[in-house]
Amino acid sequence: MLAAVVLIAFVAVIDSSGFVFVRWGVTVLALIVLVFAFRGRAWWAVALTAAIAVCWNPVVLVPIPGQVWAGLQLVAAAAFIVVGITVKVPRGTDAGRASRPSA
C-alpha cells in the first residue's frame, strides 16, 4: 500500500528533477512486493510488479512522455492495491509446524 501512496502523492513532480527519487522508491517497493508475490505463488503479480520495476527503473530510463507517466502512476498505484489485497503469503512458522510431527 505504501507504493500506491508514493505513486499517487508524487504525480505532481513527474517533470521535475526530483522524480528520480520517486523512481528509486517505486522500483525498490515493486521489487519487495515481487518477492512477496513470488512467495505467495501469484505469478500474475510477479509479472505485474516486475513490469512496474522495469518501467520505473531510474538507471535505464524508459522514454515515456509526462502525460503518459501521470496515467501510468495511477494504473501502477491501482495495481499495487490489487496485489496487496489479493496476494496471500504463507507464514513461515505455519509451514514449519505442519511438516513437523507433534510431540
Image: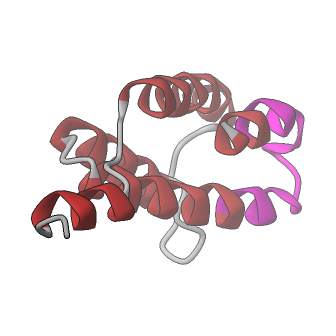
Q: Per the image, is 9 magenta? A: yes
Residue 76, given in percent of the width and then of the height, sits at: 53, 32
Magenta residues span 7-23
Inspect this view and state whether residue 62 appears.
Answer: no
Q: Is residue 96 left or right of residue 68?
A: left
Q: Residue at x 68, y 36 (%)?
A: 66
Residue at the far bottom in the pictured view: 59
Q: Is residue 31 visible?
A: yes
Query: Magenta-highlighted stretch: main secondary structure?
Result: helix
Image coordinates of residue 4 in percent, x first then y, are 67, 34
Is 3 positioned to the left or the right of 96 in the image? right
Question: Residue 19 versus residue 87: which sits nearer the camera?
Answer: 87
Q: Where residue 103 sits in the image (x, y, percent)?
A: 20, 70
**Circle count:** 0
For the point 77% across and 35% down, which residue is it? 5
- The image shows residue 89, relative to residue 72, as above or below, that is below
Q: Looking at the image, is 65 positioned above or below residue 17?
A: above
Name the image quarter holding residue 68. top right
Can you tell which quarter of the image residue 34 is in?
bottom left
Instruction: Say whether residue 26 is left or right of residue 12.
Output: left
Please tell me which residue is depicted at 59% across the width and 58% down the height of the picture. Answer: 29
- Colour scheme of the rendered structure: secondary structure
**Magenta stretch holds residue 95:** no
Quadrant location, the N terminus: top right
